[in-house]
Image: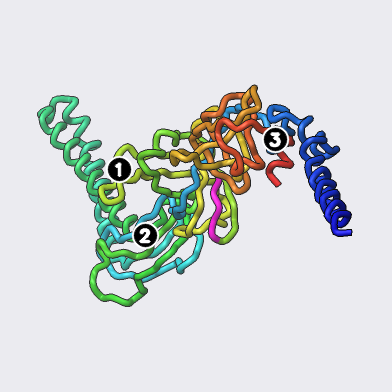
Amino acid sequence: MMKSSRITAVGIVAAAVLWIASGYLVPHEGAQGEAAVRPGEAKQQPLFRVSVVPAKIEQHAPKLTLSGRTEADRKVAITARTGGTLTELRIKRGQHVQKDEIVAVLSDDARKAQLAQAEALVEQRRAELDAKRTLIQSGALPKLDMVNLESQFKAAEASLSAARAELERSVVRAPWAGVITDVPAEVGGAAFSMAGKEIATLVALDPMLAVVEVSERKLAGVKVGEPAAVKLITGVTATGRVRYVAKSASATTRTYRVEVEMDNAQGTIPDGITAEVAVSLQPEPATQVPRSALTIASSGDIGVRIVDAEQKVQFVPVKIVEDMQDTMWLSGIADGARVIVRGQDFVREGQKVNASAVSAEAAAK
């Protein structure tokens, strides 16, 4: 009985050993599948997908936008050119006047009497010249008297011209058409002479200037005659042309004065208001890409990533020609290069990618 139990136990142990060994000696289905896949034939990972747009090189004229102010083309202080008190003031602040319109009148101060005296003297000298001319021509009087008489007559005419000019100076007129911006003088406000005293300030509003200061780095691109767009702080817009570019820099700011002339026949543009001026610079070859396409290389250079003919990523440094609201104009990119506009921040140089083309409109969204 004991012997049969031992035989049974030995048989069970032997069966168990054989069953365990069968897993190593006879390959099962899973092991066969693993053995069938060799290391060099492992399944490849899918390439990273990026979106690209072809670069199109165009001649682009960037706009230089600067903040400045409007400035009247001409501004003058109207002053009295002769003595006398102010008796009439025919203008007021804000009034539009035409050329040669009377602004003010000064007291007479015997100017009319001086004019009448000068006129009488001229008549006297003329009569004397006419009366003695015949006697001189006949030889009754020496010819030297003719020279003296003509000299006296011309001196009388000069005195008459001076008297008329003095009387005319008592009437103050506008030198050109414009707007009166200030009237510091008052009628009867001063008993002293008005000679050299300011009566009013006259500003010519047409044309109007937009004045900006341009740095020396941007000065080369600004040319006289180039168009410019002006936007006032009030929202009013106008167009004009560059009239003047300074040849000497400001000693304090090292910037150059640039004047843009605008038509202001209606007087809608005031003097001294803040204005934003956009001046077109010289065109240069560039391509337009979305702002998001711009990236920074590990070296710190600013540029874009492109996909070459071998579907590998390359970095191209660029120069910013113009920075706009949604897009940027860049130079340094070859015509037709495929610029990565989506996924450029998730790939590196030399990496092979799966590039799909998208439209420029879709890339900008």
Residue 92 in picture, x, y percent from top left: 46, 68
Q: Residue at x 34, y 55 (%)?
A: 168
Which callout, 3 or 2, points at the residue further toward the start of the chain? 3
> What is the magenta range?
229-233
Q: Residue at x 59, y 56 (%)?
A: 236
Q: Which residue is mark 2?
A: 171
Q: Secondary structure at mark 2?
A: strand
Return the mark for residue 47.
3
Q: Nearer the viewer, mark 2 or mark 1?
A: 1
Q: Nearer the viewer, mark 1 or mark 3?
A: 3
Which callout, 1 or 3, points at the residue further toward the start of the chain? 3
Seen in the picture, residue 34 relative to 78 is either above or below; the reply is above
Q: Residues within 10 Å of mark 1 (few under 14, many from 20)?
A: some
Quadrant containing the N terminus is bottom right
Q: How would you classify the magenta stretch by its main secondary structure?
A: strand
Q: Which residue is mark 1?
A: 249
Q: Secondary structure at mark 3?
A: loop
Q: Secondary structure at mark 1?
A: loop
Q: State the residue in front, 280 or 353.
A: 353
Q: Residue at x 37, y 45 (%)?
A: 257
Q: Residue at x 30, y 46 (%)?
A: 254
Q: CA distance from mark 2 to mark 1?
A: 42 Å
Q: State the residue in front, 73 or 145.
A: 73
Amino acid under disc 1: Ala
* Quarter of the view holding residue 48: top right
